[in-house]
């Protein structure tokens, strides 16, 4: 279920970044901040469990960042 939510957020951010690049940064940072909180909370588990619990949040945060930047990139190349 979390995977579907992250994919939906990435798609929405990519579309938002293409349409209004400046206004897309705030939702992107907010999403990454929320995922960072989850990663830090999962990382407090001891040993290998801490790394295993924090990894999905870290990779999701990275995916959100890539999605936002990928949406802004083609917009910057447009001639108008």
Image: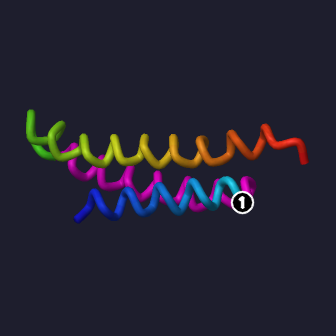
Q: Nearer the viewer, residue 1 or 33?
A: 1
In the rendered image, residue 36 lying in the magenta stretch gets the answer: yes
Q: Quadrant of the N terminus?
A: bottom left
Q: How many marks?
A: 1
In the rendered view, does 47 fall on the left or right side of 42? left
Residue at 65% x, 54% y: name it.
17
Q: Nearer the viewer, residue 43 or 17?
A: 17
| Image: 38 above or below 63 | below
Residue 45, how many percent across, how many down? 13, 46
In the rendered image, residue 8 lying in the magenta stretch gets the answer: no
Residue at 47% x, 55% y: name it.
10
In the rendered view, does 34 fall on the left or right side of 14? left
Residue 3, how many percent across, how many down? 28, 57
Q: Which residue is mark 1?
A: 19
Dot 1: within a 10 Å radius of its alpha carbon, few (fewer than 14), some, or many (20 or more) residues? some
Q: Which residues are magenta?
A: 20-44
Q: Secondary structure at mark 1?
A: helix
In the rendered view, does 41 fall on the left or right side of 69? left
Q: Nearer the viewer, residue 74 or 60?
A: 74
Residue 61, how many percent across, how many down? 41, 46
Q: Which secondary structure type mostly characterizes the magenta part of the structure?
A: helix
Residue 42, how many percent across, how many down? 21, 49
């Amino acid at each position: 279920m979390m995977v579907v939510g992250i994919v939906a957020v990435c798609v929405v951010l990519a579309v938002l970044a293409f349409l209004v690049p400046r206004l897309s940064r705030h939702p992107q940072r907010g999403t990454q901040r929320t995922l960072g909180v989850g990663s830090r909370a999962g990382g407090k588990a001891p040993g290998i469990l801490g790394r295993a619990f924090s990894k999905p949040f870290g990779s999701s945060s990275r995916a959100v960042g890539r999605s936002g930047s990928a949406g802004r990139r083609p917009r910057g190349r447009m001639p108008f």
